[in-house]
Amino acid sequence: MNLNLLVIYPYAPWPLDRGTYQRTFHLLKALALHHNVDFVALTEEPDDTGEKRAVFSEFCREVEFIPFAHPPWQKLFPQRLLNPLPSNVQHWQSPDVAQAINRRLTPGRYDLVHICDLVLMPYVLPHKHHTPFVVDRSRVDLQFQIMEHKTLRFSTRDRLLRWESYAKLWLYEKKLARESLLEVVCGPDDEVFLHQHVDPKAPVMVVANGVDLDYFHPASAPDSRASEPTVIFCGAMDYSPNVDALRWFFESIHEKLLQRLPDVRILIVGKNPIAEVQAYGSRQGVTVTGGVPDVRPYYRRAWLQMVPLRIGGGTRLKIVESLAIGTPVVSTTIGAQGLELKHGENILLADDPESFASEISRALSDPELLRRIEENGIATATDRFGWPAIGARLANHYDTLIQKSQPT
């Protein structure tokens, strides 16, 4: 069945310089290969050159960018306390955006609306009676915020504000579970959380993150491994889980690793490094690159990638990219959640500082282990994580959903 889909994103995912952009871009492209897709994105910056529009016009039937500016965050009293919407959802609301989406969502025009994340639900909920919607969750907001609350260091004021938000967010998650035709999540941990803590009957489908196997092919960049053992950490360096991961590594793991391997080098690669991340560059053997035009040469330079994440939700694109290009991974269990990888086969896992330092030093000191993890990682990525196959599975599931929802 060739469906007419409206896909709405809170941003235009281009260039592909964030993990979330990788997921949303490739799922959009895959859906457009199987269905007729009109794409609408909120955008904070004008597309003066038309570059972004040209990218999405290659595979979408129609492309519309709606100008959007983030409003100031609401004050606690009276606006925030009296507003039933969670603050993070309210922050994305705009009358102009609502008007533009209302113009499109006329009865009979689309078979299904695909939105990215729950912040867009207020725009499509009024049209649910004639056009069902599904939500792709790059992360489950309630789960993510609770993990942040347990891990990060918040002031007493910020913790109180978060408690006010959690109650509203929990109710909103329950509403999303009732009203959406489907929630698409990144991993089984997300599905378990929704069914245990939100709604046991929530319609959920797990669609793991993938990788562009041609772009991240081992031959896509020269094999220029550094002469000294080098460990990379890749990701957006203003994203709180990544910042917390580096904080934990340098506070609890780095010194232990140096005691085992004094010549080890740490390579931190990613856009927008905050001051805390930039400061790590002054440490022995640590380099902070900031944003780079192409991450592949850095993957090929490193002997392995570390993923010391303590805040989960979703799945880590950095891991599937690393597997595909042939850079072995040492990760926490939370970091690798949802990917169904096996310790000692296609990844190395450790969850406390001593074990994490030990696994890195063991891999860097054992060429045969490193080679086995690398080869198995490439095979796993090739077999399971290619975007076309992942997207086709989702597109076919949409066929089934619409057929079941139509009256006989």
Image (cartoon, rainbow, N blue to C red):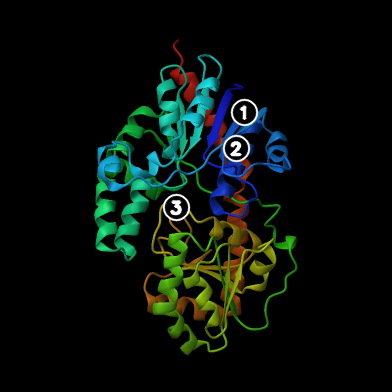
Q: Callout 3: few (<14), some (14-19), or many (20+) C-alpha neighbours within 10 Å?
A: many
Q: Looking at the image, is mark 3 or mark 2 earlier in the sequence? A: 2
Q: CA distance from mark 3 to mark 2?
A: 21 Å
Q: Is residue 233 left or right of 127 when viewed as pictured?
A: right
Which residue bears the numbered disc 2?
A: 28
The residue indicated by pointer 3 is 338
Q: Quadrant of the N terminus?
A: top right
**Residue type at mark 2?**
Leu
Res 217 visible:
yes
Is tag 1's residue or tag 3's residue first in the polypeptide sequence? 1
* Mark 1, other Cα within 10 Å: few <14 / some 14–19 / many ≥20: many
Q: State yes or no: discs 1 and 2 in contact (Cβ < 8 Å).
A: yes
* Percent position of residue 291, x then y: 62, 63
The image quadrant where one finds the C terminus is: top left
Q: Position of residue 3 (x, y in %)?
A: 58, 22
The quarter of the displayed image where residue 185 is located: top left
Callout 1: SS = strand
Q: Residue at x 63, y 51 (%)?
A: 16
**Amino acid found under the numbered disc labelled 1:** Val
Name the amino acid type tagged 3: Gly
Q: Of the residues tagged 3 and 2, which is closer to the observer?
A: 2
